[in-house]
Amino acid sequence: MTNTPKNDRSTRRPDCVTETRMGNTVLIVSGFFKAGEAYVYLKVASNQPVTVNDLFYCFRGESNRTSYIQIRLAAIQLFTTLPAAIYNMLFSDSTSLFAIDGIYLLLTLLGMVISLFADLLFSQCYYVMLDFEEYTGGEVMKAAVQLIRGSMGRLFYIVLSFFPLYLLGILSMGIGLLWIYPYKEAVFANFYLDLIKKKVATGQR
């Protein structure tokens, strides 16, 4: 009887580690498609022709820089979720369920806030990568942070403005999302172009 919780906990640990690794692997691979999407909508916003092959552009010409950026973004996501995951793994068998739930919720919310901040901070990485082919992966991330500086509040407002549209899309059984998602990506691409125009206008490098 006394060994049952220990056995349950030990069998859960590999599952937690495996799920974390799988999640980050998927996150890294999905970054290539996300960068491909950025490439497509950047071309759309610039009135350039688009083909289906553009979605796979980063698998061919930008694999090194895309990997560099996405691995670091995945590491940030891992950092934001790991404390709550470890706490849940170590203390989920405790009898103080309400205290544990409260701490777990706090760690989860804290991770979400940090994750949101990181998403906004590095939101322009793929656009910068695609626009400045001479930049290394590290230079891309630095330039992206400098570019978004002073405009994170505006980007956050844009993100929030899509929540009602997503709600309508869900209420339409997902049909509306077929139009909302492309519209959102087009808005983000145009937001980047607006940042670049302001940077050029102010003479920033």
Image (cartoon, rainbow, N blue to C red):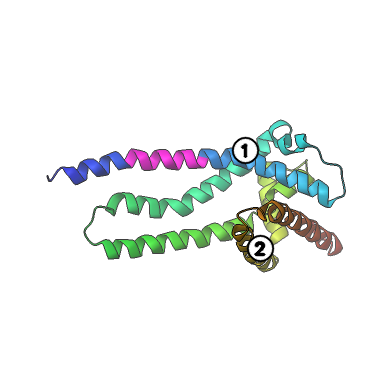
Residue farthest along the left direction in this orientation: 1
The residue beneath circle 1 is: 67
Q: Which residues are magenta?
A: 13-24
Residue found 28% across the figure and 65% down from its top:
98
Q: Position of residue 78 (x, y in %)?
A: 48, 48
State the SS at label 2. Answer: helix
Circle 2 crowding by C-alpha within 10 Å: few under 14, some 14–19, many from 20? some
Q: Is residue 18 magenta?
A: yes
Residue 112 placement, left or right of 68: left
Q: Which mark, residue 39?
A: none
Q: Position of residue 7 (x, y in %)?
A: 22, 40
Which amino acid type is shown beneath numbered disc 1?
Ser
Residue found 49% across the figure and 42% down from its top:
23
144 vs 198: above or below: above
State the SS at label 1. Answer: helix
Indicate which label's residue lies in the foreground, 2 or 1: 2
Residue 169 placement, left or right of 23: right
State whether the magenta stretch is mostly helix, strand or loop: helix
Residue 53 placement, left or right of 6: right
- Dot 2 or dot 1: first in sequence order is 1
> Gap in Å between the C-alphas at discs 2 and 1?
32 Å
The residue beneath circle 2 is: 165
Residue farthest along the front direction in this orientation: 172
